[in-house]
Structures are given as structure tokens and as C-alpha cells.
Amino acid sequence: MEVKFDLVRIGKIRKSSIAERILKHNVDLLRNDIRSFLKDENINNKHNTVHMVMIIPGKGYNVKIALQDIKDLHIKKELKNNFPNSIYKGEYSIIMDNLENKVFGGY
């Protein structure tokens, strides 16, 4: 299965380049872990692809994934079971309000 990610940042880019590097590293780690976990799964759509949103927090360094857009219940359940600390539990409207935010700055 192919996994595609959209990134959304809650708030603004941080002034500290070290904080931004840590966030980028955490995004890459979670992205690679999810892709590795789902590589042998199959989904019931013609492209065998799942799209998900990764949320970069305004505070802290814990990158989350939003499950609201994932239609396949099996995939959603597996992600909840295997990545319980990486599930976004906030309001979906917050994601929508921050869609236009710049994700990463040049450092």
C-alpha cells in the first residue's frame, strides 16, 4: 500500500532552528514508521493508497496523525492500536483553520 501525507502546522514556524530540526526529524520518523507498518496492507480502493494528515504542533514536539479522513476501518483500527500516542485528538476545525500555514521554514 502507498501512504501519502499532507502536513499541517498548528500555529507559526518556531524561531529556534534547533526546534524546527527536531520537528522535521519527528515528522520523518513517524512518516517512515507508518509507511513501513502499512507496506503489506491492502486497502479497498483502486489505487491501493491511503491519504492522511500529519499535524505539526504549535507547542511541543509530538507530531500527530489525523484519522478522520481514513475511510478503511481496518487501517484506522491498526493505526490506533500501533500508534496510540500519535493520534490527533483535537478538533478537526483546528486543522482546517491552519491549512494555509507555512509548514517548514528554510534553515
Image (cartoon, rainbow, N blue to C red):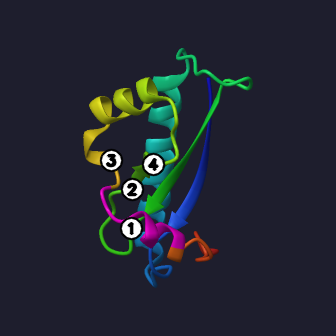
Q: Marks 1 and 3, how far apart in space?
A: 11 Å
Q: Residue at x 38, y 75 (%)?
A: 58
Q: Marks 3 and 4, how far apart in space?
A: 14 Å
**Mark 4, secondary structure of its residue:** loop
Q: Mark 3: few, some, or many residues within 10 Å (few <14, many ≥20)? A: some
In the depicted structure, whether residue 74 falls above or below residue 9: above
**Mark 3, secondary structure of its residue:** helix
**Mark 1, secondary structure of its residue:** loop
* Discs 1, 2 touching: Cβ within 8 Å: yes
Mark before the other along the chain sequence, 3 or 4 = 4
Question: Front-most of 61 and 7?
Answer: 7
Magenta region: which residues? 89-96
Q: Which residue lies under the disc numbered 2?
A: 63
Mark before the other along the chain sequence, 4 or 1 = 1
The amino acid pointed to by label 2 is: Val
* Discs 3, 4 touching: Cβ within 8 Å: no
Mark before the other along the chain sequence, 1 or 3 = 1
Q: Is residue 92 magenta?
A: yes
Q: Marks 4 and 1, how far apart in space?
A: 17 Å
Q: Image quarter for residue 50? A: top right
Image side of residue 90 versus residue 102, left or right: left
Q: Which residue lies under the disc numbered 4?
A: 68
Q: Marks 2 and 3, how far apart in space?
A: 7 Å
Q: Mark 4: few, some, or many residues within 10 Å (few <14, many ≥20)? A: few
Q: Mark 1: few, some, or many residues within 10 Å (few <14, many ≥20)? A: some
The amino acid pointed to by label 1 is: Pro
Question: Front-most of 4 and 73?
Answer: 73
Label disc, if present, on residue 57 of the rendered structure: 1
